[in-house]
Amino acid sequence: MRNSSKLLAGKMFLALACLAFGAALALPIVSITPGVGELTPWLRMLKPDAMAVITQTMFSSISHLWSGGDRALSLLLVAFCFVLPLAKFFVLACEAWSIPLASSLPGRLISATAPYAMVEVFLLALLVLVIKGLPGGSKIALQSGAWLFAASVFLSLLAAGLLRRPKGEPAN
Amino acid sequence: MQRLRLRFSVEHGFHSHINRRPVPFLHARRCNARLNLAKSMPRGDLSSLPMRAIAAVFGVLALVMSGYLIGMLLASRSGSGWDPGKAYAIWCIAAEVAPCRINGEAWDFDGSPPDLSAEILWRGNRVLVSATSRDTLLATWDRASFRISDLFRTEFRPGDLDKVARIKADASERITISIHDSDILGSETAGTATIPLACLKEGVNRVNTARSGSALRSVTLRVVSVAALEGGGQLPETLNEFTIADGKDSN
């Protein structure tokens, strides 16, 4: 049996996770400053476009991939960074409002794919590692959007823990 | 009692998962009033399963959309106004002067327009002198310029080409823009504008001057944080236009 304070806390964490996820979609997630060692200031003067700081939001990165021809990758990103997190929030909301979704086929599918939602944070961590290892002094910095994504993942995990129904307890 | 418990679990379904445990008699009596209220509620209330499902879906979507709007608001507000903790690069990109001097005389003796240069004064120091834009009433200047004197320096960095004023100041401070007409015989002031830093925003700032004793009509400044300038990123293009009259702004 869930007690009401745990249920309330779970709902609050879920609401905060949704808000953080929405804000993360709007804010920049990563910025990359290209560098070519000692020639960096000269290239900045002679070819500023090539040395411009690249700042990406979730939507801009997906649209760049789509327009660049990497449509499969952009669809994968849409699925893992947008559709699945939303589906996870729906499942948690159903848990919070005692809707017996988990036993249905869509519910089982969503629950099975939920662990892969927000894989974005993991990919960003990999990207940081890869670019930090490049020669030339290129810099990569995670922006507020990435931290909000991470916060959204953490809050949704907390919400899932608090809203989880003990085995054998029916939804309604 | 058994009937009451049954009614409770059916009609008060919103919390039915909690209330399925055996209900003590006194607690059941306390809930009786609420049970009667639930009985009188219409079919479209949150106790029905489809309505709860719709509420959950729309609730999640509404929260995500709210977060997105908050994020957009934060993204649009960040770095727009004057931040005393940040260093800014400021330079003049354009100025407009009257067709003739204040006293009605032509700018040059041969009837040609003036040769205009701009200065930025801050805390009593001349922190920027621009190149000269020749024979024009609408002067324009570039951020980077190269002077012959630069060739004679023992040390030269690419950043030295940037002719910008670097300013880190409180928003209550002011800078003075002075536009000069340079002739063979010397230089004289065409007009000045004292601008409160609080009025400046990152991007393009067009300052209209409404002073009777000045030939300066407007001056356009570029304001960029030093970090953004040195980072080589795309500079903000947001236009901020305001009018100053005798040192006071009427934005």
Image: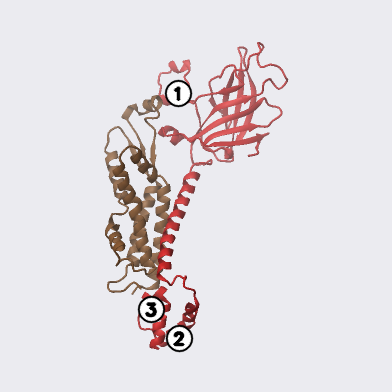
Chain colours: A brown, B red
Q: Is residue A147 above or below residue B110?
A: below
In the rendering, which numbered label is found on residue B29?
2
**Residue A73, labelled with which disc?**
none
Tell me, yes or no, if residue B238 can be seen here.
Answer: yes
* Mark 2 vs 3, N-terminal side: 3
Q: Identify the residue at horizontal 35%, vertical 38% (top origin).
A: A67
Can you identify the residue that label 1 sits on? B161
Instruction: From the image, tell me which residue sits under label 3.
Output: B19
Q: CA distance from mark 3 to mark 1?
A: 76 Å
Task: Identify the residue at image location x=48%, y=18%.
Answer: B147
Q: Nearer the viewer, residue B154 or B211?
A: B211
Alpha carbon separation for disc pair 2 and 3: 14 Å
Q: Amino acid at mark 2?
A: Arg
In the displayed structure, does residue B37 sit left or right of residue A140? right
Chain at tag 3: B
- How far from the left and from the top, in percent, is residue B174? 59, 35
Tag 2 or tag 1, which sits nearer the N-term? 2
